[in-house]
Image: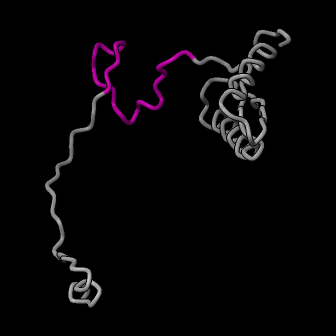
Amino acid sequence: MIADSKEVQEWNLDINLEPDTIEARVLKRPQIYSAGQNDRALDDTKILGTIVHEPVHFRKWAIFCLEKDVAHGEYLNDRFYELSEQRRFDIYVDYGDIVELSNKSGIEAFKDAIDDYYRAYVCGKDA
């Protein structure tokens, strides 16, 4: 038995083989209330189909990443597009731009890239 092993005795370890016990209870699921339903709780099985916002189409968006992470950015782009189609989010999501920065870029380079992208593609101004 492990508690009687040579290593345990040499290291002066005390191993208790009795399992620990904890007391637990299952909590009641939280309730979600909607003001449009006279403060009645929404059925949690139907909450995913409930519109809680006004859908807004994406006009322009981008993923900013290091050169080494471009493949991950492309995967994220693909998944976001596919999910928006499959889940019928009621929004149009086109592929975002992938802005690739040098692998040695720090936070300041990211800030500058975001500012430049915003000015050029959102505001329509040259940097």
Residue 109 coordinates in the image, percent (x, y): 72, 28
Is residue 93 or residue 105 the one in the foreground?
A: 105
Where does the magenta region start and end?
A: 32-54
Quadrant housing residue 113: top right
Identify which residue, 26 or 72, lies in the foreground.
72
Q: Nearer the viewer, residue 122 or 25?
A: 122
Q: Nearer the viewer, residue 57 or 43?
A: 57
Side (left or right) of 109 relative to 38: right
Which residue sits furthest right? 126
> In percent of the image, x 18 and y 71: which residue is there?
19
Q: Position of residue 2 (x, y in %)?
A: 26, 86
Q: Residue at x 22, y 85 (%)?
A: 9
- Quadrant in which the N terminus is drawn: bottom left
Colouring style:
one colour
Q: Residue at x 76, y 31 (%)?
A: 95
Q: Is residue 111 left or right of residue 54?
A: right
In which image quadrant can residue 73 be found? top right
Q: Is residue 1 magenta?
A: no
Asked which quadrant contains residue 66, the reply is top right
Q: In the rendered view, does 80 fall on the left or right side of 52? A: right
At which x and y percent is residue 55?
A: 59, 18
**Quarter that holds the C terminus:** top right
Residue 35 shown in magenta = yes
At horizontal 78% and vertical 42% (from top left) the residue drawn is 67
| Count of marks overlaid on the render | 0
In the image, residue 36 sits, relative to residue 113, either above or below, namely: above
Vertical side of 30 occupied by 16: above or below = below
